[in-house]
Image (spheres, grey):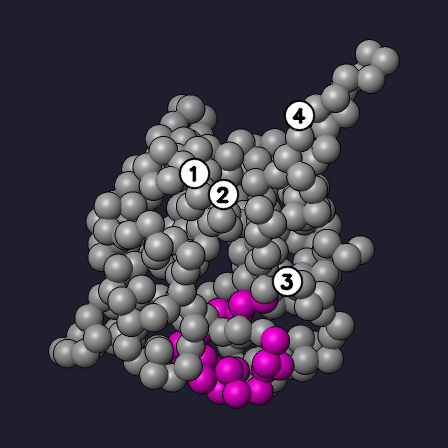
Amino acid sequence: MTRQFFVGGNFKMNPATQEQKRALVKVLNEATIDPAVEVVVAPPAIYLLALKEIVRKEIKVSAQNCYLKSSGAFTGEISPAQLVDAGVPYVILGHSERRTLFHETSAFVAQKTRAALDTGLSIILCVGETLEEREAGKTAQVVEDQLKPVVEALKPEDWSKIVVAYEPVWAIGTGKVATSAQAQEAHANIRAFLSSAVSPAVAESTRVIYGGSVTAANCKELGVYQASYIRLPAVPVIGHTFGVCAQLDVDGFLVGGASLKPEFVDIINAKKA
């Protein structure tokens, strides 16, 4: 199965001014963008609707978060129903900054995922381990523990609206990047878990993207060519081993800081270059 390549831009609490927002949108609107790539950008909530109106129609917008209730006395929150009513198709849930800074548990993330799906939103679902967890060899277990409550809350058909973003916490905003082998291993483990916990069909069709200091300089090494190849075993030839493609399970990127720069266009177009 060929999974559509996905590139998301998480602006976080940026840009700081309306002028910077307009300059960023101008770059995206004037760029030549690969039509085969699904592109989604997630600005701060205050800019969400304004950006949606001025960015080119090929680029979708996403909220950075939402609550699990559709209305009520929840000061400062945005409901999934409000996002759908505003024509916003995506929301990011489970980002490590929400888990660590705002103490969101995996069970709470699962509740929000269920609520968002019930209103018609698509989800960019973030998972990932800390440096200490990776060094302790716990990456696969940590990610599975983050996914289990979501698996329990979802039906198999719901996964068609989920993009899983593997973001090692130690690589977010640090300049450190997982090696291509580390990214592939984590993505393959996620797919194996989904195959066991949900179904092989869901595992094969669900897009799993990488996030963590992605730039135009490193995105190719992280596996941008996977969608163009069929999974085949490595073939030994005269004492050498040639693989078809190392990063078969990397279906795109969730980009942080680089999504605020012109190089974001290069990341979107990486498969064409």
Magenta part of the chain: 39-58
Amino acid type, callout 4: Pro
Number of labelled discs?
4
The residue that disc 2 covers is 204
| Crowd class of label 2 (few under 14; some 14 to 19; many from 20; radius 10 Å) | some
Real-space Cα separation, disc 3 to disc 1, in angstroms: 24 Å
Real-space Cα separation, disc 3 to disc 2, in angstroms: 18 Å
Labelled pair 3, 2 in contact (Cβ < 8 Å): no
Labelled pair 3, 1 in contact (Cβ < 8 Å): no
Q: Secondary structure at mark 4?
A: loop
Q: Is residue 107 left or right of residue 66?
A: left
The residue at the point 28 percent across, 52 percent down is: 155
Horizontal and vertical percent position of residue 158: 34, 56
The residue that disc 4 covers is 233
Seen from the viewer's position, the closer of residues 123 and 127 is: 123
Seen from the viewer's position, the closer of residues 100 and 143 is: 143
The residue that disc 1 covers is 200
Q: Residue furthest right?
A: 238
Real-space Cα separation, disc 1 to disc 4, in angstroms: 19 Å
Amino acid type, callout 2: Glu
Q: Residue furthest left?
A: 73
Q: Earlier in the sequence, mark 4 or mark 3?
A: 3
Labelled pair 1, 4 in contact (Cβ < 8 Å): no
